[in-house]
Image (cartoon, rainbow, N blue to C red):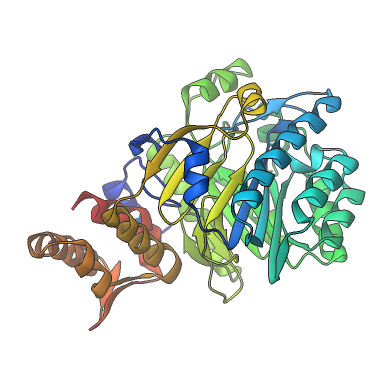
Amino acid sequence: MNKHLKDLLINFHSKGRRYSYYPSLPDWSGDLDKEFIIDGLDLEEINLYIHIPYCPSLCTFCGCNIKITKAKNQFRSYINKIIEEWNTYKLKNPKISLSSIYLGGGTPTYLELEDIKHLLGSIFDGTEVSPDFIGTLETDPRIEQSKKLEYLRSVGFNSISIGVQDTHKDTLLNVNRDQSFEQVKDLVNHSRDLGFDEINLDIIYGLPFQTEETFKETIEDIVSLSPDRIANYPLAKVPWQMDLQNALGLYKPLGTYEMYDLYIQSDEMLKDAGYNLLGMGHYSNKGIKYNRDITGYTRAKKTSLIALGTSGISNTRDYLYQNDKILEKYIAFPNAAIKTHKKSNREKTLEILFAQINCEGRLRKETLNTCFEENQIEKLSKNIKIFKNYDILVEDSDSYTTTAFGKHFNKTICQTIESI
């Protein structure tokens, strides 16, 4: 195991955001009316995120905004509110068109087929779609979804993100996820047969009772399926989640050192299998450029992200705003925002810098100079010198570029820039 990498990860370890948008929600300062914001937008080609919160059962590691239910008759009323929200955007931005759609959750394919058709039929109706359209859905291999995937593929969806988390039975059962590797394999193969040209598998390190040996087996299983992308997330430790995990059996959470042991082991295995680290735990075996937004790394065009549904966060050139996180309140007021933020010029430039680091693997000196005063550049240069000494960044006349080793420290670089 790479001791130098582990020492640096420990040295630079800190909690913090993942820089998929900026500034993060806790730092928002506005209370603008959402309809006022929409009135002022000039939206043309956009990326669309649609949040489907419903799941049939609770996985106790989950930190998403979800609703566990068996009552599928409630889906249509929620979908109608999403359509109502979408029609508000279309009415006030008649030139709006779609670069991409991301169906997130929850479990979007838990919806009935007719509900999915109603939702997407209404979204696509009278809306121009890019010839390079990217349609992505998140899903669970335990769901019966063959016909739903066939429909989604028929309307242009070409990317699928499958929640695997782990392939060790005891680890999965402990977090209330009764899932077999055969179910994962069948879903991957079926998606390929249908023509989905990007398959992403999500895994989590730091789950209760995971060991280096069991997680090694999980990585071997994942690699055997040859997905195009792999997202390797650390377990998000939040208070309510920990209570639920403890209800299924007391355990000692993995410490920072143990978490990094799992991360480094998996990183070495994935790279040996031909995957390149994009940053923030995301890997790809394709030599293509990805953008980054609230949904993670994406092939979708870099443009405004409009989010529909409960808790959805929209990110436009000038504004950030979030729909109500409480499902019932969203259904009552789909065109209201619970929190908003108008970006300053400095925040817009910082957002560009973070995108450069996370998507291009570089910091352009010209952009740095537009964001910082001379004395701030001087302070930043001292930190950059440290990164250069550790082989995290290399310098040329126009920019600072992250090394392959340096991509482990994207968050640290972003935090350093933000702190100046």
Q: Tell me how many marks there are.
A: 0
Residue 313 visible in rendering: yes
Image point (76%, 36%), residue name:
79
> Residue 51 vs residue 414: left or right?
right
Residue 235 visible in rendering: no
Residue 129, picture quadrant: bottom right
172 or 362, which lies in front?
362
Q: Residue furthest right?
A: 147
Residue 15, picture quadrant: top left
Image point (36%, 53%), residue name:
411
Q: Residue furthest top?
A: 247
404 or 323, which lies in front?
323
Residue 327, position as x, y percentages in the image: 64, 26
Image point (64%, 58%), residue name:
94
Q: Residue furthest bottom?
A: 397
Residue 128, position as x, y percentages in the image: 72, 65
Residue 349, position as x, y percentages in the image: 31, 61
Image point (81%, 26%), residue name:
74
In this rendering, the answer to whether 188 lies above or below 109 is: below
Residue 154, position as x, y percentages in the image: 86, 61
> Residue 118 vs residue 352: left or right?
right
In this rendering, the answer to whether 380 lies above or below 176 is: below
> Residue 408 vs residue 112: left or right?
left
Task: Work out which quarter of the rendered image holds the N terminus and state it.
Answer: bottom left
> Residue 199 vs residue 323: left or right?
right
In this rendering, the answer to whether 161 lies above or below 179 is: below
